Amino acid sequence: RITLLAEGCRGSLSEKILKKFNLREKGNGQHQTYALGIKEVWEIDGGKHKPGDVLHTLGWPLDQKTYGGSFLYHMNDRQVSIGLVVALNYHNTFLNPYEEFQKLKHHPAIKPMLEGGTVLQYGARTLNEGGFQSIPYPVFPGGAIVGCSAGFLNVPKIKGTHTAMKSGMLAAEATFRVLNEGSSMEIYWDNLKNSWIWEELYRARNYRPAFEYGLIPGLGISALEHYLLKGKAPFTLKHGKPDHEATNVAKSHRPIHYPKPDGVLSFDVPTSLHRSNTNHEHDQPPHLRLRDPKIPELVNLPEYAGPESRYCPARVYEYIPNEDGQPKLQINAQNCLHCKACDIKDPKQNIEWTVPEGGGGPGYSVM
């Protein structure tokens, strides 16, 4: 029997397997680095709709030390998909990805198109950005890891479906040979390194880590890499700190004051959450677990000003007064969008995202 793990980004079983068998070290890979994507689907006026149009941006509304950008795709039936992707190795603990997305929609290049439209759905999900440098050895005793669980997303293209499908095909072919010919699953690893996945990710390898130096240097390095060197630079840049270690303490930054939502283009979290059709049974054990229940009040709140209340795009985490009037972390697990940002960004890696019972979660239909 062979088990193939295809859980998507930050897969629960995959992460345990990676750690148990030291697969990242075995593949000479760095730590994985992630981004949080927040997205809405709108229905807009027919006169503004241009099916097939694509808009990608980089930078604003984010600061120049934070990597990220937006996308806007014109789909069918007067629908547009708009979103913001924020790298989770941002330094400012006061940064709020959800609020940054609300700001984006007020840009003069976007606002006129959305005005008069209606939001159909809202959602969020993390994605891998480690690329070539973070590829682990994908084979473990009795199985293999494929797709975004292993981290095959092409960052410049913001695209990983094609590589996920191809890795699944390679793993399936290897599995067939193991079960029918008695060969080893290591042929999956060999075939992966000889496939166009390896070549494509290698050519794009320096794009994401170039922005460790800031927006302007990142643009310069990535342009040089893409247009002149064609991905054949004689060097490979390394990623910086893991995302959870990149967060600075609160005293290093000033709080960010975001504008209030206008209810037309920008919205509060409860309104957006309703559009995600998220639902969990209330009587099940919490699927968001604290390894140490004391860390939020003893570390996260005093040192980092409670970052979980900001990086979560569904207001799962909030500090409320207890019976003594002291702030205590409350976890609203029923709000969870399954984006897994908390599992990644918590400064002390104290939050563990586990699979909820009964298939609960967001009910996306047009995302």
Image (cartoon, rainbow, N blue to C red):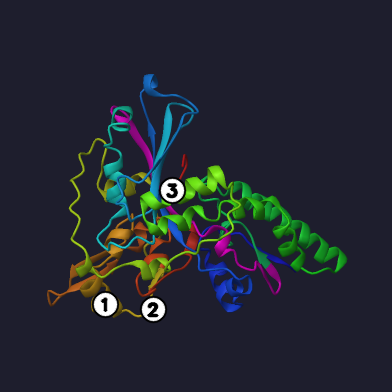
**What's the residue at 28%, 36% (across, down)?**
107
Label 2 or label 3, whichever comes before in sequence order: 3
Q: Amino acid at mark 1?
A: Val
Task: Decide: is 34 above or below 365.
Answer: below
Asked if disc 1 and disc 3 are in contact, CB closer than 8 Å, the reply is: no
Q: Residues within 10 Å of mark 1 (few under 14, many from 20)?
A: some
Magenta span has 282?
Answer: no
How far is the residue under mark 2 from the one under mark 1? Answer: 13 Å
**What's the residue at 46%, 26% (across, down)?**
77
How far is the residue under mark 2 from the one under mark 3? Answer: 42 Å
Q: Is residue 278 visible?
A: no
Q: Which mark is residue 267?
A: none
- Which residue is at the front of the view, 155 or 360? 155
**What's the residue at 43%, 56% (across, down)?**
35
Q: Is residue 209 visible?
A: yes
Magenta region: 114-143
Q: Amino acid at mark 3?
A: Gly
Depth-wise, is mark 2 or mark 3 nearer the camera? 3
- The residue that disc 3 covers is 220
Disc 1 element: helix
- The residue that disc 1 covers is 299
How far is the residue under mark 1 from the one under mark 3? Answer: 38 Å
Q: Give residue 303's position: percent from left, percent from top.
A: 23, 74
Label 2 or label 1, whichever comes before in sequence order: 2
Q: Residues within 10 Å of mark 3 (few under 14, many from 20)?
A: few
Q: Horizontally, is 362 left or right of 192 in the view? A: left
